[in-house]
Image: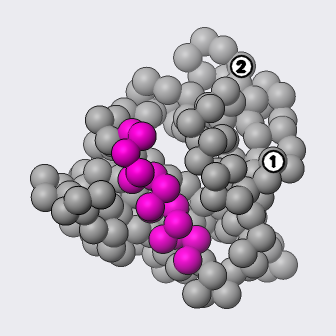
């Protein structure tokens, strides 16, 4: 990953992050959102997430090319040491190690903060995401059938868990 750096997110990254994310919103089942997110809305998300969880970006000389963050698994206090993890990479940067590097850095940040468990939720089918999670040590723990409807079809969601 020549000339790339992984660093904490900045509010100035919101537009680049929204651009990466909106490709997934508009063209894939990876996220269940169906409408593009504005840079201002993404800035609000960044502010809310970073109040308690890590959010990292991978920056290249030409700008942000990927990001990863953790968020609350559920809102009840007993879940406070479990997080849901997310990673997105720009479409032209897939299969170059960016997602793995971001995810490893995110997991290290969660460990440093004392988190016990990371959970990845994957809209299925998604061989690339399943492969990434399993390479990092996540284990599939469950799957819900037909819980999302997007792009004219029903979508399953699988859950992968990693004890930190």
Q: Quadrant of the C terminus?
A: bottom right
- Location of residue 11 by image quarter: bottom left
Q: Is residue 101 magenta?
A: yes
162, 68: nearer the viewer? 162
In the shown orientation, is residue 50 left or right of residue 15? right
Q: Is residue 2 magenta?
A: no
Q: Which residue is mark 1?
A: 140
Magenta stretch bounds: 94-108
In the shown orientation, is residue 2 left or right of residue 42? left
Query: On screen, 99 above or below 8?
Result: above
Q: Residue at x 52, y 61 (%)?
A: 103
Q: Which residue is mark 2?
A: 154
What SS does tag 1 mark? strand
Q: Position of residue 59 (x, y in %)?
A: 25, 61
Task: Report the Cα–Cα distance between label 2 and label 1.
Answer: 20 Å
Query: On screen, 142 above or below 14?
Result: above
In the shown orientation, is residue 46 left or right of residue 151? left
Does any portion of residue 49 appear in the rendered image?
A: no
Secondary structure of the magenta portion, mostly?
Answer: helix
Q: Position of residue 125 (x, y in %)?
A: 67, 27
């Amino acid at each position: 990953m020549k000339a790339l750096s992984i660093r904490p997110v900045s509010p100035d990254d919101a537009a680049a992050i929204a651009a990466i994310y909106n490709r997934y919103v508009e063209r894939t089942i990876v996220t269940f959102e169906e409408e593009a997110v504005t840079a201002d809305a993404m800035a609000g998300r960044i502010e809310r997430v970073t109040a308690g969880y890590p959010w990292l970006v991978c920056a290249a000389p030409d700008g942000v090319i990927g990001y990863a963050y953790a968020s609350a698994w559920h809102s009840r206090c007993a879940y406070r040491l479990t997080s849901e993890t997310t990673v997105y990479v720009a479409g032209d940067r897939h299969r170059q190690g960016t997602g793995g590097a971001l995810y490893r850095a995110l997991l290290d940040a969660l460990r440093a903060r004392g988190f016990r468990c990371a959970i990845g939720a994957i809209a299925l089918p998604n061989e690339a995401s399943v492969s990434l999670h399993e390479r990092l040590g996540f284990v599939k723990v469950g799957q819900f059938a037909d819980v999302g409807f997007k792009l004219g079809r029903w979508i399953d969601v699988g859950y992968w868990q990693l004890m930190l």
